[in-house]
Structures are given as structure tokens and as C-alpha cells.
Image: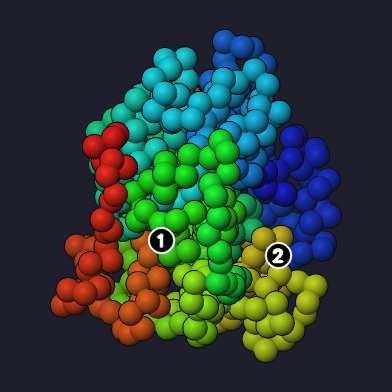
Amino acid sequence: MIDQDMCTSRRSFLKGAGLLAAGSALPAWFVEECAAQQATRPAASAAPSEQIRLGLIGCGGQGRADARNAQRFGKVVAVCDVDARHIANAKKDFPDADGYGDFRKLLERNDIDAVICGTVDHWHTLVSIAAMRAGKDVYCEKPLTLTIAEGKHLIEAEKQTGHILQTGTQQRSSIRFRLACDLVRNGRIGKIEKVEVWLPAGLRQGPFKTSAVPEGFNYDFWMGQTPKVPYVKERTHFSFRYWWEYSGGTMTDWGAHHNDIVLWALGMDGSGPVSVEGKQLVEMIPGGFTAASEYEVTYTYANGVVHECRSTTASEWHGGVKDPNRQQHGIKFIGSDGWIWVTRGVIEASDRALLTEKLPDSAPRVYISNDHIGNFIDCVRSRKVPICPATVGHRSASLCHLGVTAIRLGRKLKWDPVAEQFVGDAEANTYLSRPMRKPYDYSMV
């Protein structure tokens, strides 16, 4: 989706960001920096010869939103979904696009430069690998993978093919999250001692009834690699994310955003924690959603930083303060000299001077992107590495998968971030991958 901080010109950016600075603590020096960066942002392509030709695989709400956003730089020429209703909806947005029920047919086309993968989570890896092997660059929604093992396959495919993969963790292209990471990395709040992450609680509902598969919906293809089960409406489309079989609840859905920012701020994009401990806080309803709806997870890193990740309900707020008018999730970095709180649309600190004091020009900065889809398109054209390649998306997803595993096992686990294995725990290591139902395995890509 288009970040609310995006503007189309330096003048409009300054005007809009000035209002944002007054209302949500964006410091003036950073607003000026961001305005100066406007000239480096990719421009929309007017000439047909310069447009990126796009294919959309997975035409649900987020996929269509990504594709509409990407059309600033190109043209969607093909759409694909296992549900005919989704194809029909996508054709309303992209009337000239051809429709497909099998993504492999779309990938056979030589006139497609890049694809947007907006499928359910358990199809992300196979679709992305197939696309890169078919000569396409890929923008894949988060979380990048269903398992940790899948991430290794994606990284290998990215290396072998030389194609661009951008993970849809668009918070890395938000100015507030970038500011928070720059400040944390440059010691603005001293030595980092703890990071607190709050995620929205998931759904706890059920039991659900089976029913007939809707006409035009290829349910077997939708299930893909996962176990074959009778059709239950609530398993599919938006609510798939509350089933462990297809996702990991809000731990992987929102965790792929906020926990990703933790790794970015700590400078650990290629690593991870050395231990993880988790537990489920409420029992799920038999016959209903299977991913834990309320939970808490504690990660510990080799440098001693403790990273706590908890679900939060609508009545809760951070630090004991309740405010129903503000977002109930985000990230709090706690250091020896203060704290910084950041979420979408808001950045705050224990002392406003922590934000308003300009960083030195010589201070090292994180990768600058003010437009996530735009960064992807720019890298498709330039062949530069995007802000969230497979290596980054894999580690961010892995952090969430570690949390889900700890929640399901209900105990502390030791993790080797180099070998990417649990230490001395055969049962936990069985969670690194999952059996893939044939023919929906790596043989199809």
C-alpha cells in the first residue's frame, strides 16, 4: 500500500511533512532531509517503452492494492488467482489484463518483466522461486515464507537467477521507522538494553462448519502444500492468517513488520537471537482457528539485548497507559539514556530532545527508501539490491517463525543464528520445515 508519508514533489512533501512534524513529533531537521531525498525517488513512466510490464499472482485485497500502487511505474498485463471471483475483481482494476487460474501459465509469458505475489502465505515461496526461474523479478508480500527452510530455498534461487526480490515489509520505507533505526544505531538512547514489541491479538473463534466449495474456487490448488482438509470458509481468503497450517497468526502477520524493524535497528539483518521462549496465553477453541491469538515471546541476543514481543488487546496500552484513540501496537526501544517509541504515524521519545537534536552529517545511516514499491521498480531498472531482498525477508520471517515455534512448544529454546538450527532440541528442529503435499512441492517450480 502507499505509505501515508509519500508525496509527489519536494514542495508538497515539505508542506505535508510540516503538518506531520507538528502533530506527531517528526523533527524539522529530519523533515528537511527527507525533502532533499525527493529527487532520488523513481519517477512514474509515461512512455510505454519505459513501463515495467507486471503480472499479479494472488488477486485478493492486498495484492490488488500493491498492483494499483505499482501501476504508477508500469502496466499490469496479467492477473492470476485460484478464485474466479478474485480474477473478476482484479479485472475491474486492470481491464486490459489477461486472467489465469494457474500461475505457471502466467509465468510462461515473455512480455512480463516482474510479478507481484499477493497470495496466501503458504504459496509465497513456490510462486517466488518459479517466477525468478522464469526470468521475472518479484515483489512478494510478507511474511516471505511459511517455514525457515523455505527462506533458504528463496535465497538460493535469488543468487542462482540474479533476479530482484523485494519483500513487502513496507515499514522499512517509512520515514518514522527509518528515523527510529538511525537514532538507535547511532547511540541516541545509549546502550540498548531492551526492545518491547506489541502486536495486535489474533482472532479466537470457532468451531466452524464445513460446506460446499464455492463455484469457481480451486480449493485443492489453494491448499497447495498444506494437508488436505474439508472446505471451511473461514480457512480461506482473509482469515487464512489465523490458522497455523497456512500462517502463524498475528505473530507472522504483524510480527513480520514490527519484528523486522527490531532487526534493522539492532543491525542484525543477517543474524538473529540465541534463545527464544514463548507461551500461549489463552487456549484456542477446538474446531476453530489454530494460531495462538494471545501470546508472549522473549528473544535474547548474543549482545545481551532482550526483545519482548506480546499480543495486545484493544483495551490495553503500553506502559500501563490506556488510550482507545491510539494504535495498540508498535515498538519501544529502551536504552541506558532513554526510550523511543515508534509505530505507523507516530514517533515519540522519553525526552523530545532525543528526536530534535540533529544527527551529525557523518553519522552512518540505514538504507534510504521513501517508497517501497518505487524502490522495487527502481531496482528492477538499475539491478541494484532493494531494501528488503530475500536475505532480509528470510531473517525477519525466521524471527517470527521462531516465536511461533516457542509458543507452540511452550518452553525456552536455544537457537544458533549461524547454523539456523535449534541447539540440542530434535523436536524443535522438526518445525524448521513442513511436509509438502504433492504435487505442490519444489518439483512444480
Helix, strand or loop for disc 1: loop
- Tell me residue 385's x, y (percent): 41, 38
Q: Earlier in the sequence, mark 2 or mark 1?
A: 1
Q: Residue 88's image quarter? A: top right
- Give me the C-alpha separation between circle 2 and circle 1: 34 Å
Image quarter where the N terminus lies is top right
Helix, strand or loop for disc 2: strand
- Tell me residue 269's x, y (percent): 38, 57
Is residue 263 in view?
A: no
Image quarter where the C terminus lies is top left
Identify the residue at horizontal 42%, vertical 44% (top origin).
220
- Give the class, few, some or many, for how many residues have Cα within 10 Å of label 2's Cα (few <14, many ≥20): some
| Above or below: residue 86 compared with residue 20 | above
- Tell me residue 142's x, y (percent): 49, 51
Return the mark for residue 245.
1
Residue lying furthest front: 212
| Above or below: residue 277 compared with residue 396 | below
Q: Amino acid at mark 1?
A: Glu
Nearest to the eye among marks 2 and 1: give it: 1
User: Is residue 352 left or right of 234 when viewed as pictured?
Assistant: right
Return the mark for residue 346.
2
User: Is residue 306 left or right of 212 when viewed as pictured?
Assistant: left
Q: Amino acid at mark 2?
A: Val
Is residue 324 in view?
A: yes
